[in-house]
Image (cartoon, coloured by chain):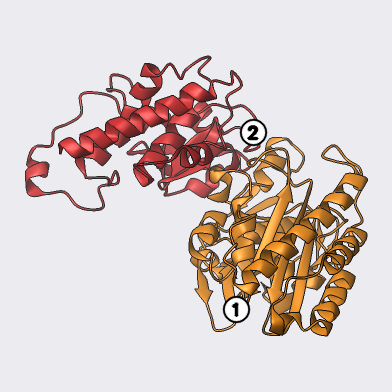
Chain colours: A orange, B red
Amino acid sequence: MDFLRPASWEEALAAKAEHPTAVPISGGTDVMVEINFDHRRPEYLLDLNRIELLREWEVGEENVRLGASVPYTQIMENLRAELPGLALASHTVASPQIRNRGGVGGNLGTASPAGDAHPALLAAGAEVEVESVRGSRFIPIDEFYTGVKRNALQPDELIKTVHIKKADGPQQYSKVGTRNAMVIAVCAFGLALHPETRTVRTGIGSAAPTPIRAKEAEAFLNAALEEGGFWDNGKIITPAIAKQFADLCSAAANPIDDVRGTAKYRRHAVGIMARRQLGWTWEQYRGTGRTLEGAA
Amino acid sequence: MRVNFTVNGRPQEADDVWEGESLLYVLRERLGLPGSKNACEQGECGSCTVRLDGVPVCSCLVAAGQVEGREVVTVEGLAEYAKEREAHGGCASGACGTSVDQAKKWEAKPQDSQTGEGVELSPIQQAFIDAGAVQCGFCTPGLLVAADEMLERNPSPTDADIREALSGNLCRCTGYEKILDAVRLAAARQERQGEAV
């Protein structure tokens, strides 16, 4: 095994071009587990810890440009207003020790359907900026996940920045597990209201081969909210609409039975989370001040 | 490969390090610092918690090559670290400056800051003993490092703060109540000392 330690982003891209099999390591919270357990013996480890720009973030007009290695702790502490969904999701990641090391770039690189950041990214709307010596490109988050632990990266590309839409309305995130820390999601759900465009977006984690949006549920709710004039009159969403939305979210899930839970339970829980989060976010949108329910 | 880094204030050089090796392995097997415990090797248990440039991390998940040029504090150096922090008004690294008077009073340490032998215990260590928070002791080093960091950052923690700060550290004797007692005790003593100054 070789340990490559580029001092700059350009050096990192050159190293990845020369050694496409090199495994990037930043927080190490996924990669080191595989190495410790002898599940993986990469020919090259490509350490990204010395590259400052990956640990930086910038709040722009419409987006937050989040460096791939910004630790979850920093997201929780500094980006709660701009990225409320992702901040909530970050707080559910493992433990303080892990949140001090791990970042969204690693979640995307590993592309596990159970990655905690995915539902929040899907709900908020995001693009992943990846780069190689050939140039850079932006991959919409909806096209990023291509299969179980597979993503749209080419072998010579590295994840540089995640461009996430700043919240223009309330966002929520929840995750089902046996305790509040050190839990791989049984399933997870994220919801973002986008009052500017009068749309809602969702994200489902750990309940399909990849993280997914419940697009039919979104389309239904968008139409129902529009039809009922809810965005303007701020009325309580009727139970029938909430139930239909929840059922469609459940139906979007395509889970499996495994050690953490059954497919049936996951599908059920996704619906429950969807209904509750719709209630919480809508209350917040209406300005009734009941914003803390469900906050991690 | 060779890795140069600072452990408990002293420059260290580890040779013949395998590229996939963890910081934990280097500490325990190459530098003779077995205080950080090896249990789950997957970041679940927190027994191997150390501070990397001041931040608590699981040393089993840090690749040895990643610590090149960086500073690590292990449980062996915790007492010394806490002492330095007290002397520098909450700044253990010394980066916030040393007064001339303080500098004049400096003398070489009689104890070994590397292994922790002969060093007076840190307040959090003393609190663990006084509160009976040590059973088999295997989880204790990780808990000490995590708890000490929380009290540095948050001198008046709520119970929820303590639980969250220690949520990445498992105790299989399940002596959690006494561990919480110990952290509360250390916080109370720290507060009283602050008032006295």
Is residue A58 shown above or below A41? below
Question: Which quadrant, please, contains the N terminus of chain B?
Answer: top right
User: Which label is found at residue A237?
Assistant: none
Identified at 48% across, 30% down, the residue is B143
In the foreground, A214 or B78 = A214
Q: Report which residue position mark 2 lands on.
A: B41
Question: Camera-side residue: B165 or A46?
Answer: B165
Instruction: Classify mark 1: helix, strand or loop.
Output: strand
Give amino acid for label 1. Answer: Asn
Residue nearest the viewer, comparing B41 with A87? A87
Location of mark 1 (residue): A63
How crowded is the residue under tag 2: few (<14 C-alpha within 10 Å), some, or many (20+)? many
- Residue A161 can be seen, yes or no: no
Q: Quadrant of the C terminus of chain B?
A: top left
- Give the percent coordinates (x, y) of residue B44: 64, 36
Image quadrant in which you'd find residue A94: top right
Specify few, some or many for label 1: CA neighbours under 10 Å numbering under 14, 14-19, or 20 or more. some
Q: Residue under mark 2: which chain is it in?
A: B
Q: Chain of mark 1?
A: A
**Residue in the image at 85% along x and 53% along y:** A207
Left or right: A249 in relation to A200 = right
The picture places residue A158, in percent across and down from the top left corner, at: 67, 66
In the figure, residue A125 lies in which quadrant?
A: bottom right
Q: Say what amino acid the circle numbered 2 marks.
A: Glu
Helix, strand or loop at label 2? It is: loop
Q: Residue at x 75, y 43 (%)?
A: A40
Reply above or below: A174 against B80.
below
